């Protein structure tokens, strides 16, 4: 089992705000995964803050390639809309699709993923 950690969790982790033990456990066990979209959300702010070591550590994580199936993204968006869930952005749908394609659990604080997981086979950590 690998766990794709969403940027919402990383941001809180970097602040020391919540679930630091859970993230530390996943890191220690070698279970952390990422993708280029999540890195693109995190790395710019870290570069501005000159957090080179942290960027290096993030870049060293197991990275799962993103292969966007646009028909699937559209299907997920339609499912959300039909079930009264609006506002799930395309980046979140791509992250969800990436987790499902690679059979990863997704660790997130973003409520959109919880709502999405009610309608698609997205496994949350």
Image: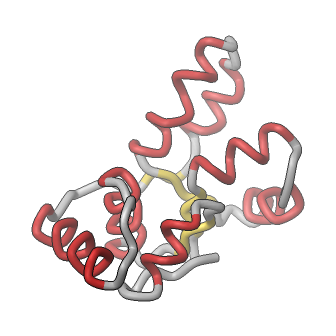
- Give x and y (percent) for residue 12: 76, 46
Q: Quadrant of the C terminus?
A: bottom right
Foreground pick, 109 / 87: 87
Q: Is residue 73 above or below residue 34?
A: below
Query: How many circles with numbers are drawn on the protein?
Result: 0
The residue shown at (46%, 81%) is 117
Q: Residue at x 65, y 61 (%)?
A: 109
- Left or right: 80 as drawn, with respect to 5: left
Comparing 91 with 106, the one in front is: 91
The residue drawn where x is 38% and y is 87% is 119
Viewer-nearest residue: 52 or 99:
99
Task: Report which quarter residue 19 is drawn in.
Answer: bottom right
Residue at 78 percent across and 39 percent down: it is: 14
Q: Position of residue 24 (x, y in %)?
A: 83, 57
Q: Position of residue 21 (x, y in %)?
A: 89, 61
Which residue is more in the foreground, 87 or 74? 87
**Residue 35 placement, left or right of 8:** left
Colour scheme shown: secondary structure
Give the residue at the far left of this rendering: 71
Residue 1 in the image, given as x and y percentages of width and height: 58, 78
> Is residue 94 shown above or below 1?
above
């Amino acid at each position: 089992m690998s766990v794709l950690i969403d940027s919402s969790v990383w941001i809180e982790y970097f602040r020391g705000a919540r679930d630091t033990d859970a993230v530390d456990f996943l890191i220690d066990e070698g279970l952390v995964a990422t993708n280029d979209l999540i890195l693109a959300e995190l790395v710019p702010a870290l570069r501005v803050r000159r957090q080179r070591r942290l960027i290096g550590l993030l870049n060293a994580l197991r990275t799962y390639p993103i292969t966007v199936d646009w028909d699937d993204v559209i299907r997920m968006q339609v499912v959300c809309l039909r079930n009264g869930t609006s506002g799930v952005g395309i980046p979140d749908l791509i992250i969800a699709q990436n987790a499902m394609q690679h059979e990863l659990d997704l660790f997130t604080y973003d409520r959109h993923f919880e709502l999405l997981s009610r309608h698609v086979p997205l496994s949350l950590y």
